[in-house]
Amino acid sequence: MASFVDRVVLHVSGGTGGHGCVSVKREKFKPLGGPDGGNGGNGGDVILRVSAQTTTLLDYHHAPHRHATNGGPGMGDWRGGKNGETLILPVPDGTVVKTKDGEVLADLVGEGTEYIAAAGGQGGLGNASLSSQKRRAPGFALLGIEGESSDIVLELKSIADIALVGFPSAGKSSLIAAMSAARPKIADYPFTTLIPNLGVVQAGDVRFTIADVPGLIEGASEGKGLGHNFLRHVERCAALVHVLDCGTLESDRDPLSDLAIIEAELEKYAVDMSYAGVDGEVVPLNERPKLVVLNKVDLPDGKDMAEFVRPDLEARGYRVFEVSATSHEGLRQLGFAMAEIVQAARDAVQATPPKVTAPVLRPRAVNESGFKIRREEKNLEPLFRVLGEKPVRWVKQTDFTNEEAIGYLADRLAKLGVETELFKVGAKPGDTVVIGEDDGVVFDWEPTMMAGAELLATPRGTDIRVADIGDRPTRSQKRDEQIERREAKAAARAELEAERKAGIWTESVSGRRAQAVKESHLDSGDDD
């Protein structure tokens, strides 16, 4: 069973806000004391917080779906609903939050650093909060809104100053165990280390952290071995230490060829932009300061191999150290060399002021409406889509089983200028209007009166404007009526044509005389 996970896909959703309450205060001798419905509580947020007690993302690997609690509904007597509890998800130091497309959302470094992964939904207002001078006793309340929901990717990048890289069984874990208090698993077979190990080293006045990358072999950049999966843990390191095995028993390997292979794999690895220095740039792994460690010099063959390859490595410009994790030979000198590089990197960070991007405040323009209308076409019929934060939120808050709530929504949209803009873009009564994107609410648009205060003298929960909508013909009824009128006109024309052909359609004097003579003969009984 896996005990270490450094990448997970997490499904988070904030709590849904509670619905507002519809209530009227009733006391003795005061049966209608006014609205007293409370507001619904807000839904809880889902927050990622860096915790020193968490070192792996294993918990989220087994339980990737996390949901904050919902807000409570409002109650009578002006009592508000309970807010949903915030869900705190502890993550290790160095966790990077991304979208599934790879966009970096947050880089969580430092104890207590937080990121709101999913905000909770807003609670609905009760009828007490909706009352006004013109709407004294609302018979409706606003609904709570669902919380944000998203799928995010968590990647762990260890916080270390020095990274140990090398082939399996080169002795990286043994070096960490010898130089620090860390106790990683050590064995005499390849791929013993399956997770990145961290150790804290004290060299003089400098304290720093070292980490190893397990399973780095040829082809790691193409997915072979384990190194490619764990190279992300090296991205934050200031320097690299190549650990070369001088006591290997494999005949086709030697320290120089191992170094060339590892350098080639580091060059192929593309450093993620989620971590950058104070200058906003990322230094590739193969361009960072390097030290070369010739390990296992306690072995006779290892000592001879180290003396053989050391001049060649120094000629290439590397600082070379002959060490033994078993006998601790050369570890002190190596520790001070590491501390020197780490201190230089820290001094450079302090000397270089970080780039601070000044926040740009862009107030909303005076004539900005806060929404836009996009004209579309569906089934050869015009469709008008209203997009904007306010209209979409207002629709989600509306109880469409309550006529008064629908009327209130119509008043809000009219006050925002939606109806005026619909007229400008060519919308006609009966056209389809959608508020929101694909899952938006669909309406057959019927223009309302701009001033609705005088129409509110109706029983609570009703609105005569909405009631009248049920008596208005729909588009299909209007189409059928138009077809019936067209057919009636065609029948009338056919009847007139038949009368014309029979000679009884004219209104001329001779025609009237002939018709009068014929009628007189019929009255006298003359058969001639």
Image (tube, helix red, strand yellow):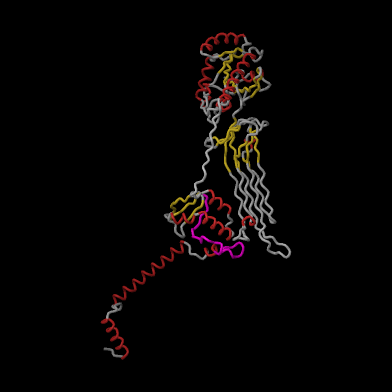
Magenta stretch in the rendered image = 438-464
In the figure, is residue 420 to the left or right of 131? left
Magenta stretch holds residue 518:
no
Q: How many marks?
A: 0
Residue 186 visible? The answer is: no
Q: Residue, x 33% and y 74% (percent of image)?
A: 496
Residue 465 position by quadrant:
bottom right
Residue 304's spot in the image, x, y percent? 58, 8
Q: Is residue 176 above or below residue 47?
A: above
Residue 522's spot in the image, x, y percent? 31, 88
Q: Looking at the image, which residue sits at the far front?
A: 366
Q: Residue, x 41% and y 67% (percent of image)?
A: 484
- As rendered, which of 157 and 343 lies closer to the eye? 343
In the figure, is residue 277 to the left or right of 332? left
In the figure, is residue 390 to the left or right of 127? left
- As rendered, which of 407 and 272 lies closer to the eye? 407
Q: Residue, x 67% and y 31% (percent of image)?
A: 52
- As rendered, which of 395 and 423 lies closer to the eye? 423
Residue 119 position by quadrant:
top right
Q: Looking at the image, which residue sits at the far right?
A: 28
Q: Main secondary structure of the magenta part?
A: loop
Q: Residue, x 47% and y 56% (percent of image)?
A: 420
Residue 51 position by quadrant:
top right
Residue 313's spot in the image, x, y percent? 53, 12
Magenta stretch holds residue 450:
yes
Q: Is residue 163 above or below residue 149?
A: above
Residue 472 visible? The answer is: yes
Q: Can you say which quadrant of the picture contains the N terminus? A: top right
Q: Can you say which quadrant of the picture contains the C terminus? A: bottom left
Residue 350's spot in the image, x, y percent? 58, 25
